[in-house]
Amino acid sequence: MNKRQSKKLYQQRHGYNPGEEDRIQLQISDTIKYTECRLVEAEKERVNRTYSGFLESIKQRPRSKARWWRRTR
């Protein structure tokens, strides 16, 4: 086996395939785009959840309590 053949055999054994390089690069860039978009969406969801929790935690002040306070001052 000459040097060229051994090199090709090594590349096949260890998963290097120049024909698949473009497909792999595209897959990597798609994954990065998806991850970045998902991070932005997750941040928006977190902010919305925090704000809705804040709104739920605010209780309406009963008007009768305000009236009681005015009367007893």
Image (tube, rainbow, N blue to C red):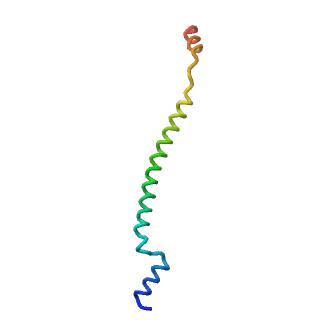
Counting from the top left corner in percent of width and height, residue 34 is at 45, 54
Identified at 43% across, 66% down, the residue is 23
Identified at 41% across, 62% down, the residue is 26
61 left or right, relative to 41? right
Identified at 59% across, 15% down, the residue is 65
Q: Nearer the viewer, residue 13 or 58?
A: 13
- Residue 15's place in the image compared with 41, above or below, is below
Q: Tell me which corner region of the image, top left, top right, bottom left or bottom right, holds residue 27.
A: bottom left
Q: Nearer the viewer, residue 58 or 17?
A: 17
Identify the image quadrant of the N terminus.
Answer: bottom left
- Residue 8's place in the image compared with 28, above or below, is below
Identify the image quadrant of the C terminus.
Answer: top right
Counting from the top left corner in percent of width and height, residue 8 is at 43, 83
Identified at 46% across, 54% down, the residue is 35
Counting from the top left corner in percent of width and height, residue 54 is at 53, 32
Residue that extends furthest to the bottom in the rendered view of this protein? 1
30 left or right, relative to 64? left
Counting from the top left corner in percent of width and height, residue 14 is at 48, 77
